[in-house]
Image: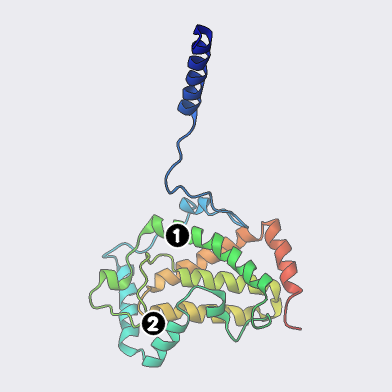
Amino acid sequence: MNTWKKQLVFIFAALALGACAHRQPAVSGQQPAQQVYYVNAEPFKSVQFGPPPVPGSMQQEADIAAVLSWQNKRTEADCAKSQRTSEETYDSFWAGKSPFPEPLPAEVKNFFERLASDLGKADRNMKERYRRPRPFMAYPEARPCIKKPGSFSYPSGHALYSRLFASVLADIVPDRASEFFAKADEIARDRVIGGVHYPADITAGKAFADMYHDELLKSEAYRRDIEKMKALLVK
């Protein structure tokens, strides 16, 4: 090979190696950033919010006493009822009371899935901040009668989801607001009856839902979708 050709081969090889050296390596298992539909979950890692009762405090003792009190008086029917709403989904919470046609129209289902996607991330961020063990994790005498969740206890996700969904439904059908909130309170209370939450978790979940709803109302996309939902109500 001529000398000048050898030089060209060397130059092209060097350029190719340089390009490889500057290329960013792929990260194994790296997930794309999750989409935010209405409310960004990041602020809930640090937003001002009251902590759970301190272990050993009078408030903590009152919390576990309430759980054990329900444990001693609940019935099989109470446990079965608590189990029916153990999934944090629209259908689980509002079956028979939904203002929408059944089966749920795809547009409505997708709307609540978008809400749940944002809300689930915010819920995890809050739970990770406080890392409160559930009653059965901290007290051997606490015996749930429903499926044991593996997540932390504070704030209650069921109280959060049910109340937030009630607020959303009230935005769509204001005349039924009291009915929706009463159902949300019932769902939240069932978590204490079932033995997987303290009363303080429920109170915090409701407060979190109200805080989150305030943020939802600031979202133009949410307000636009609410108007779309109104057109899909049972006639």
Q: Percent from the top left, x then y, of residue 104?
A: 64, 78
Count of marks placed on residues: 2
> At x 70% / y 80%, what residue is drawn?
175
User: What residue is shown at x 61% (from left), y 82% (from top)?
Assistant: 179
Q: Residue 166: where, in percent of width, then height?
A: 59, 74
Q: How crowded is mark 1: few (under 14 residues within 10 Å), some or many (20 or more)?
A: some
The disc at residue 124 is 1
Figure quadrant of the C terminus: bottom right
| Residue 192 horizontal/vertical position (percent) | 39, 78
Q: Earlier in the sequence, mark 1 or mark 2?
A: 1
Q: Which residue type carries mark 2?
A: Ile
User: Which quadrant would residue 143 be assigned to in this image?
Assistant: bottom left
Q: In this view, does 80 lie to the left or right of 223?
A: left
Callout 1–callout 2 Cβ contact below 8 Å: no
Q: Residue 173 carries which label?
A: none
- Corner quadrant of residue 200: bottom left
List the residue tagged with mark 2. Answer: 193
Amino acid type shown at disc 1: Arg
Most foreground residue, 195 or 27: 27
228 shown above or below 233: above
Secondary element under disc 1, as helix, strand or loop, is: helix
Secondary structure found at label 2: helix
In the figure, is residue 219 to the left or right of 207?
A: right
Label 2: how many Cα within 10 Å (few below 14, some 14–19, many 20+): many
> Compared to 175, does 18 lie above or below?
above
101 relative position to 212: left or right: right
Could you tell me how far apart the alpha carbons at marks 1 and 2 are, in whole angstroms?
23 Å
